[in-house]
Image (tube, grey):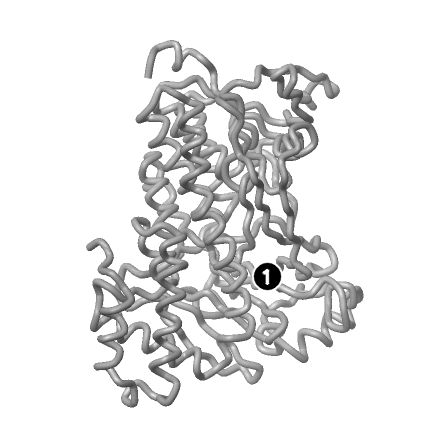
């Protein structure tokens, strides 16, 4: 890039995970970067309880963190998870591995812990951090973005709308300005289910009360409970439940109703959470949804990145990984071209099919996690997927593995191949209830005919 390109400051709106990672990548390329954040500096002010859902770090996110040079620092915050631990109503446990190789694991990581590491790295890279500076709007006719300085009694100031990256999340102020002023069509499809975050504490000596190396799931059909481990031996427990209805968040408003609900559906975990009712009533109920915007960019003035462009539900553990992949791919495009407007358009064109695909897969995974995992056929399909991968490793890779462990396979390709593989599994198990009863010669013919070889 030319020197004048580097002299032009870059504005990033939102110092969450996407914004801080993007700031690091841009600063490492020699750009001057100003990073605006509406909240206080989370390294110095405790975040609100109930808003710190653990995240699942997988291959796509790891690759981006390595590119930014921060993965070594992140390692200490990670808890490896090789599979799911399913809890039935009677307390019986079933462990379902995610893959069949030692490196096929995902990692539980604290959102604030990771965000603080990225903020430190951004500061060290020379990024100018401006906290308590929310973006309050944009004027596209004048090409200005307005920020409020809450450190100075709410004074406002404007920034030129040039090379502005909106990483301000699913409720993006700048995306909504595009909708209001430019007529950009955007859908925000909220689920009828919400979530509540709770805590499963460790034993007094710090030992975890349940298996630390698993993502725990209590599937109950229309709703579920999950638990992700923390490095201190505790677990972050999240209830996903309908917002309204007979058994829903609107009916769980007293300690008695909460105790009855958990005793009925999650009796094993209820015994391990002494502050359950208190936490439940004091923590907020979160909402979830999918954001799809028909437009992410405006010349070289503005680009939506991460959740601001394509927020998804959390059920495939890919929200953060997808946003980090955004940053990595955008960094590569900007490195290859001095034409920012062209790079913005290329980013939007190349990423949209993949972000749409992972949004759809996330919804499908919710149905699987809360309901399908209780079906014996589901477990047969999982076992058969691993067997077919062993027999045909260059062609048959389970969809979950393509999404979580293969950063070289785009989401859209994983989605399409996953659809074909599911059809093959259904055909092979139509008259087979065990792996031994599967016709593997037929499997080979179907796989050879319908699945092209994947990159090694």
Question: In the displayed structure, does residue 369 sit left or right of residue 270?
Answer: left
Which residue is at a point 52% across and 61% down the rendered structure image? 235
Q: In this rendering, is residue 281 above or below 223?
A: above
Q: In this rendering, is residue 136 above or below 426?
A: above
Please tell me how crowded label 1 is: few (under 14), some (14-19), or many (20+) other residues with Cα within 10 Å.
many
Q: Quadrant of the C terminus?
A: bottom left
Which residue is at a point 65% across and 23% down the rendered structure image? 138
Q: In this rendering, is residue 368 above or below 72?
A: below
Q: In this rendering, is residue 425 above or below 362?
A: below
Q: Residue 197 or 240: which is nearer the viewer?
A: 240
Residue 374 locus on image (x, y percent): 51, 79
Task: Give the residue at mark 1.
Answer: 238
Q: Residue 230 or 264: which is nearer the viewer?
A: 264
Q: Residue 377 or 66: which is nearer the viewer?
A: 377
Residue 236 locus on image (x, y percent): 55, 59
Question: In the displayed structure, does residue 130 sit left or right of residue 230?
Answer: right
Which residue is at a point 62% across and 70% down the rendered structure image? 223
Q: Quadrant of residue 5?
A: top left
């Amino acid at each position: 890039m030319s020197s004048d390109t580097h002299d032009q400051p870059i504005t990033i709106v939102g110092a969450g995970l996407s914004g801080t990672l993007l700031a690091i990548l841009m600063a490492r390329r020699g750009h001057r970067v100003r990073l605006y954040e509406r909240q206080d500096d989370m390294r110095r002010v405790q975040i609100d309880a109930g808003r710190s859902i653990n995240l699942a770090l997988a291959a796509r996110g790891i690759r981006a963190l390595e590119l930014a040079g921060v993965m070594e620092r992140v390692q200490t915050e990670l808890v490896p998870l090789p599979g799911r631990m399913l809890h039935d109503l009677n307390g019986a446990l079933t462990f379902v591995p995610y893959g069949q190789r030692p490196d096929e694991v995902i990692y539980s990581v604290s959102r604030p812990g990771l965000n603080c590491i990225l903020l430190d790295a951004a500061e060290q890279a020379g990024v100018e951090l401006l906290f308590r500076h929310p973006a309050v709007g944009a004027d596209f006719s004048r090409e200005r973005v307005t920020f409020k300085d809450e450190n100075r009694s709410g004074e406002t100031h404007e920034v030129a709308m040039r090379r502005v990256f909106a990483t301000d999340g699913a409720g993006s102020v700048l995306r909504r300005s595009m909708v209001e002023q430019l007529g950009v069509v955007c859908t925000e499809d909220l689920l009828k289910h919400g979530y509540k975050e709770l805590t499963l504490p460790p034993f007094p000596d710090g030992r975890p009360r349940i298996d630390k190396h698993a993502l725990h799931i209590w599937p109950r059909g229309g709703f579920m409970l999950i638990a992700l481990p923390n490095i201190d031996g505790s677990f972050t427990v999240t209830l996903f439940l309908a917002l309204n209805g007979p058994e829903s968040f609107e009916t769980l408003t007293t300690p008695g109703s909460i105790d009855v609900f958990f005793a009925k559906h999650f009796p094993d975990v209820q015994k391990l959470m002494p502050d359950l009712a208190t936490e439940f009533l004091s923590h907020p109920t979160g909402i979830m949804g999918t954001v799809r915007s028909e437009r992410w960019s405006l010349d070289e003035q503005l680009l939506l990145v991460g959740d601001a462009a394509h927020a998804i539900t959390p059920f495939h553990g890919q929200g953060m990984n997808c946003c980090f992949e955004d940053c990595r791919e955008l960094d590569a495009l900007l490195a290859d071209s001095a034409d920012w407007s062209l790079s913005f358009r290329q980013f939007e064109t190349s990423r949209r099919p993949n972000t749409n695909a992972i949004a759809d897969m996330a919804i499908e995974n919710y149905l699987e996690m809360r309901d399908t995992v209780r079906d014996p056929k589901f477990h047969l399909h999982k076992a058969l997927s691993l067997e077919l991968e062993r027999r045909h490793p260059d062609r048959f890779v389970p969809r979950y593995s393509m999404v979580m462990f293969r950063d070289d396979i785009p989401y859209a390709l994983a989605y399409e191949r996953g659809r074909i593989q599911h059809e093959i599994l259904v055909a092979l198990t139509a008259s087979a209830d065990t792996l031994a009863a599967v016709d593997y010669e037929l499997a080979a013919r179907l796989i050879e005919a319908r699945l092209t070889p994947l990159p090694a």
